[in-house]
Amino acid sequence: MKNTQKHNGDVKIRLIEAAGQIFAEYGYKAATIRMICTRAGAHVGAVNYHFRDKQGLFAAVLQYAHQWSVRKYPPDLGLKDRATPEDRLRAFIRSFLLRILGDGVPDWHGRLITREIIQHSEALDPMVTNSIQPLYIYLKEIMDQLLDSDPADQSCQEQAFLCAMSVLGQCLNHFTGQNIVSRIKPEGFNQLDIEGITEHITRFSLGGIQDIKRRKNEHIP
C-alpha cells in the first residue's frame, strides 16, 4: 500500500511539473492533456484520476507554484515580530522579487502566473482568493502602519490600497517588462540585481508614502 501511495504521489507531482511547463509555454487553451501526460511520462487517465479534468489540473498547478515559492521566500523573510514597518516593507519587496526573479525558482512559475494575470482563465478567481489576496492583506497592513491609516476613513483606506498597488506594480514590472527594459537600457543595468532593485523600490516607495502622510497631516488635497 505504501509503495502504491508513493507511486501515485510521484505521478501527481510529475503531472503538476509537466503541466506547469506546458501551460506556461502554450497557454491554458492551447495546452492539451496528451501533451502534458507525454512530458510527464504518465497515462492520459492519470489527469482524471488525480485532478478530475484539465481545469482542476490547472488550478492545482497554480496553487503548487504559489505555495512552493512562498515556502522558499516567505513575505516576511523570517523577520522578528518587533520589526519596523519599513523593514517589513523591504522584506516583502525582496521576497516578491526573489519569487519571480530569484535563483532556484523554476522559470515556468513566473511565466505561468504572469500569463494567467494577462490572459486569465476560470482559475483566476481561486488563485486570487487562495494566493494573491493573503499577500495583498499582508502588504496592506504594512501600508496602514506606514500611513497611520484610520480603518474608518475611506480616503485613508483608498490611499493604502493605491500604495500597495504601486509597490506590487513596481515589482511585477521587473518581470513582465524584462524585454522592454533590455531594449531601453541594454547595458549598465542588471535585471537580476535583486538586492539593488529591492533597495530602490523600498526607498522610492517610502518617499512617496511619507509625502502622502505629510500631505494628509497638513490637510493638503
Image: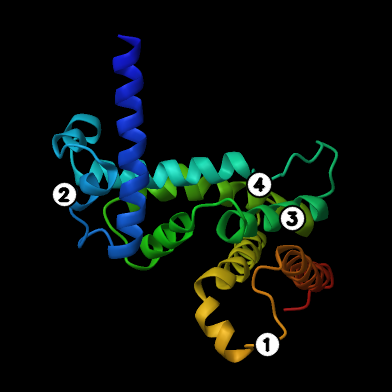
Which residue is depicted at the point 82% across and 37% down? 80
Quarter residue 186 falls in: bottom right
Circle 3: residue type: Leu
Q: Is residue 8 visible?
A: yes
Which residue is depicted at the point 37% across and 45% down? 17
Q: Which mark is residue 89?
A: 3
Circle 1: residue type: Glu
Q: Residues within 10 Å of mark 1 (few under 14, many from 20)?
A: few
Q: Which mark is residue 34?
A: 2
Say which quadrant the N terminus sits in.
top left
Q: Which residue is mark 4?
A: 75
The disc, 2 or 4, on the residue closer to the chain's N-terminal end is 2
Spatial CA span between label 2 and label 3: 43 Å
Spatial CA span between label 3 and label 4: 9 Å
Q: Tags 3 and 4 in contact by the CB under 8 Å rule?
A: no
Q: Secondary structure at mark 3?
A: helix
Q: Position of residue 42 (x, y in %)?
A: 22, 38
Quarter residue 161 falls in: bottom right
Q: Secondary structure at mark 4?
A: loop
Q: Residues within 10 Å of mark 3 (few under 14, many from 20)?
A: many
Which residue is depicted at the point 55% across and 46% down? 69
Q: Nearer the viewer, residue 120 or 142?
A: 120
Q: Which residue is mark 1?
A: 187
The disc, 2 or 1, on the residue closer to the chain's N-terminal end is 2
Q: Position of residue 81 (x, y in %)?
A: 81, 36
Q: Secondary structure at mark 2?
A: helix
19 versus 198 height, above or below:
above
Spatial CA span between label 4 and label 1: 31 Å
Farthest bottom residue?
A: 184
Circle 2: residue type: Arg
